[in-house]
Every structure is written in structure tokens, then in C-alpha cells.
Image (cartoon, helix red, strand yellow):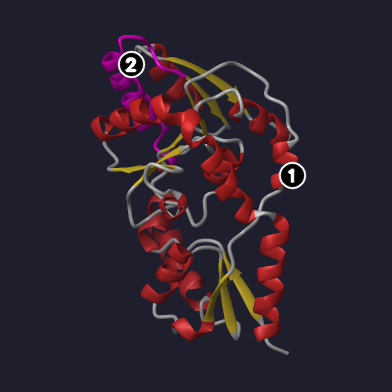
Amino acid sequence: IPMMVTWHEVYGYNHWRKERNPIIGAFAAFYENRAMSLGDYLIAVSNHTRGRLIQKGVNEDRIKVVYAGMDVDAIAGTPPGGLESDLIYSARLVPTKRTDLLLSASELAGKKLGRPIKGVITGDGPQKDQLKRQAYNMQVDFHFTGWLPEPSEVWAHMKKSKIMVHTSEREGFGFAALEAMACGLPVVAMDQETTAVKEFVEEGKTGYKVEPDPESISDAIITAISNHQSMADNCRDYAKGFSWSSSGENLIAAYRSA
């Protein structure tokens, strides 16, 4: 019976070293590399993850790409809720998500617009208090919701926003970005090899890809806010391709091909 192993992300030693410590990081990286030898086929949830597996020495013939899915119908049926905002970011508040970069870029965008940027950040994590203090001392108007137990609560906040800014340093897929698109929000994503989010952004149609610096991000924020209404239908149409049914059909096809 063929064994299929799904990979959501490939981290590597540098990530594990920073996330834990050098000793545990070395063990985790060794375990991760050994795990790549398991299974007749590996299912990667994005082309980004597929590329990372190949970089680690996995034969590309062993890899099948099956994008993860989301409940597009449930998102469509969720009514707007929460505060009106210019932008939203949904993430665990840890260093790799670079929420501090989002705040810096938002402050700069507000200075260019002549008014503070209104933002909502959903999620919790060890950096929450630090980020709230940072936002309090900046010329921004940000609301931190904390952890929201129901996905529909996050989607409701998305539907009261104009855009999503996804500053994460690394992502194996990017559920939050695609859920935002399903809500009609264009996404400002980082143009880096370490994140899969840029795969889902078509320049000027579903969002913008920028360098991870405050100046570039601030310009993209202003452009995306100005164009968000004209891009909303493109975003929703694109997100439909990542429904649970579509993902399930592709997964079944991958299993049958084995």
C-alpha cells in the first residue's frame, strides 16, 4: 500500500535554532530531514513547499502538489462584524509574523495620507503586549482583538476591512491571505522566497507583492486601499479555486495516481 505524507512547510535548521535553541534546533532539523525519506509520495500544499522539499534533496518525482482548502461557502455566508478598518492582519503574534513591520509601514502610510491608518490585528501570542505598546506610541489607530475562537469571527472582521497586509517572513501555505481574498480583500504580500503567500497574489488583480521594508509596504497599502473595491470580485473569484471540494477532488486524484 503506497504511503502518502503531507508536508505543510519545510523549516530547516536556522528556523528551529531561532524558534528553540541550537541543541534542540539541531535535533529538530535532523528529524525533519529524516522525515523526508518517509513515504512513497510527499504531498506539498503549495509550490513553495514543493520547492523547499526539492532544495532539501527530495526527488521531485515523489512530490505531488495539492493545495489546501477552505470553506468558501461558510466565508461567503458570514456577515460583516467588528470595527471599520483600513487593513487587517490575522496571525499568531510571534517574531516570524513581523507584525512590528506592519505597524511601522502603517504609520508611514498614514503620514503620507495625512491621517492615521485604522487597522485590526486578530490573534494572540507572546508578542501581543509588546506590539500593543508599540502601536500605542505610534501614529496609528490599531485594535487588537486577541484570540478569536470561531473562524467566522475572524471573517467578520475581514469583511469590515479594505485590505489585508501579510508581513509574515515564512508561510508554507497562507490560509489567512486566501480567507481575506474570499472576503473580497486584496492582499499585500512580501515578495520573498520564504513565503508561499506571494503565489496567490496576481499583481494589480488580487493584491500587490512588495519588498519587506516600511517604504515599499506603505506605498502598497495606499495603492491597495485606493483600489480595493475594483479588485474585490477578482479576489473572491480567485479564492473559489481553493474550496474544500476542489481541494478534496485534487487529493483523491493524487491518491489514485499512486
Image spot of residue 121 (x, y percent): 52, 27
Q: Position of residue 24 (x, y in %)?
A: 46, 60
Q: Is residue 122 magenta?
A: no
* Earlier-in-chain disc, 1 versus 2: 1
Q: Quadrant of the C terminus?
A: bottom right
Residue at disc 2, secondary structure: helix
179 vs 89, left or right, is right
Mark 1 crowdedness (10 Å alpha carbons): few <14, some 14-19, many ≥20: few
Question: 203 or 7, which lies in front?
Answer: 203
Name the residue tied to disc 2.
110
Residue under the point 27% across and 31% down = 214
Q: Position of residue 140 (x, y in %)?
A: 39, 14
Badge 2: few (under 14), some or many (20 or more) residues near its Cα, within 10 Å?
Answer: many
* Vertical side of 242 occupied by 61: above or below: below
Callout 2 amino acid: Gly
Q: Is residue 195 positioned above or below 86 on the image?
A: below
Residues rendered magenta in the picture: 97-118
Please identify the quadrant where the N terminus is shown: bottom right
Q: Residue at x 38, y 19 (%)?
A: 134
The x, y position of residue 210, in whole percent, is 30, 42
Amino acid type for the residue under numbered disc 1: Asp
Q: Is residue 163 visible?
A: no
